[in-house]
Image (tube, grey):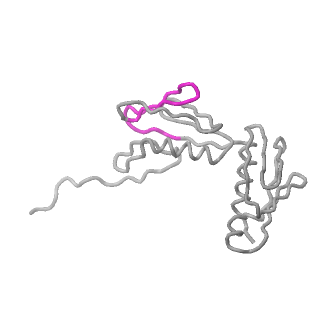
Amino acid sequence: MSRIGKAPITVPSGVDVKVDGTTVTVKGKQGELSRTLPATMKIDLTDGVITVDRPNDEPDQRALHGLTRSLLNNMVVGCAEGFSKRLELIGTGYRVQQKGKALEVNVGYSHPIPVEPIGTNTLKADGQNFIDISGPSKEDVGEQAAQIRKVRKPNPYTGKGIKYSDEVIRRKAGKTAAGTGA
């Protein structure tokens, strides 16, 4: 049996879960998420504990078992506590400014790059060199962070660019000063 799939999900207080066939809706203090899950998975909600069961041991059903449980757990955690990512801008003149709910990123191009929030995400400029992304959906927060990072990926030679705050950029050696004789 799947180790992830068979683990029960405890619903914290303040979070309301509704199972309607294959559609699960979760409401909490961070927001509301709804998702349609695979029809073959059996989702059971009793006494504040969600369990996921699979119909058989076929490889595709085993894979869906763990996936379904992980998606449900992320929904519950997201609505209860939320998810967040922090990005860091490294480089001379690289900065970020808050423009209402959106951000304006200057990273060495001739023009500033506008960044709009995805879904229910909140974007916050922390100083001039940090971006905080938070929201109830782990998928949306990760996608937003990846899109912002893609604007100017970190350069392995100089270290300049937009990186996750916990990311380590492996630096490469540049060209050697002089070659050996002819």
Q: Quadrant of the C terminus?
A: bottom left
Q: Which residue lies most toward the left here?
A: 182
- Locate residue 59 relative to residue 151 in the image: left or right: right
Q: Nearer the viewer, residue 38 or 141?
A: 38
| Residue sitting at x 61%, y 44% | 140
Q: Nearer the viewer, residue 125 or 22?
A: 22
In percent of width and height, residue 131 lies at: 53, 36
Q: Which residue lies most toward the right here?
A: 47
Task: In the rendered view, tell whether residue 96 sits above or below residue 154.
Answer: above
State the image quarter where residue 101 is shown. top right
Look at the image and say whether residue 141 sits in the magenta stretch: no
| Residue sitting at x 43%, y 50% | 169
The magenta segment is 87-107
Q: Quadrant of the N terminus?
A: bottom right
| Residue sitting at x 73%, y 67% | 3
- Locate residue 97 relative to residue 74 in the image: left or right: left
What secondary structure is the stretch in magenta mostly built from?
Answer: strand
Q: Which residue lies most toward the top here?
A: 100
| Residue sitting at x 73%, y 52% | 36
